[in-house]
Amino acid sequence: MSTFRELKLTRAREYILANPDQSKAEQSRGCGVSPRLVAQARAQLVAEGRLAPSRKAEPPRPKPQPAPEPSEGAPAPTLYDHDAMAAMAAAADMAIDSLDDEEIHRRLLRQALRFALDMKLHVDTRLSASQMYFKLRDMAKARNLGPGAPVDFETGVARLADLHRACGPKMVLAAVNLAFDVKEAPSGQAEQAAPAGGTPTPPA
C-alpha cells in the first residue's frame, strides 16, 4: 500500500509530464505539492530519460584529474631537457679550455646525435639537435673539401702564390722537383748563377 508521500510524488510526476515547460514553482502550485517534492520528481524523470534536463541547470563540473606521475627512471620531459642542456653547457666549458677545435667539433657532433635520438627528450629539443647535427656535419664536409677549383687562371695563380709564400722557396722548389720528376744536378755541376744583366757561367 502506497504511503501519502508516494501518492503525492506520483501526482507530481504525472503533472510534470503533462506540463514539462512550466517552472518548478508553477508545477508545485499546479499539483499541490512542495517545491522540494517537485524537484525530487523532476530528478527521477530526468534520470529515467522521460524529461529533458533543465536548461538553467548548471552542467556538472569535470573532476580534476591528478597529473600522471612519471615512470621510474624517466623524469618529466621539461626537467630532463633542462638537465641535459646544463650538462652539455658544463662539458662545453671544460672542452674550450682543454681541447682543440677538431675534438670539440667531433664531440658536438656526437652529443647532437645523442639528443636527436633520445626519445625521453621533448620533440622540439630533438628537432633542434638534429638540425644542429646536420649543420655541423655539412661544415665538416665543406672544410675537408676545401674551397674548390679556382674559377679562372688568375685566381689559381694567386692561390699558389699565397701557398708559396707560406712554404718558402726551398720547400716550393723541392715540391716542384717531386711533382714533375726533375732530377737535381750533382753537386759542383750546377750552373752558377749569372750576375745581374749577364749570362750564366758554365761549370769548369
Image (tube, helix red, strand yellow):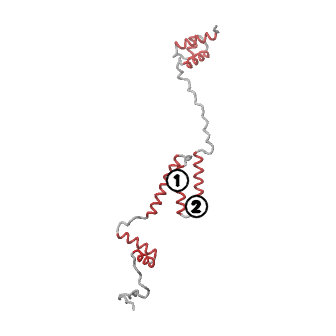
Work out whether mark 1 precedes mark 2 in sequence or the reverse, and give the earlier one.
2
Question: What amino acid type is highlighted by mark number 2?
Answer: Ala
Image quarter for residue 161?
bottom left
Seen in the picture, residue 189 relative to 100 is either above or below; the reply is below
User: Residue at image x 40%, y 76%?
Assistant: 181
Image quarter for residue 75?
top right
Residue 152 marker: none
Seen in the picture, residue 10 relative to 159 is either above or below; the reply is above
In this image, 164 relative to 95: left or right?
A: left
User: Residue at image x 37%, y 67%?
Assistant: 150
In this image, 149 relative to 32: left or right?
A: left
Residue 42, image x, y percentages: 57, 17
Element type at mark 2: helix
Q: Which residue extends farthest bottom?
A: 204
Q: Give the crowd class for mark 1: few <14, some 14-19, many >=20 residues within 10 Å.
A: some
Q: Which residue extends farthest top?
A: 1
Residue 9, image x, y percentages: 60, 12
Residue 84, image x, y percentages: 58, 51
Residue 113 marker: 1
Residue 95 marker: 2
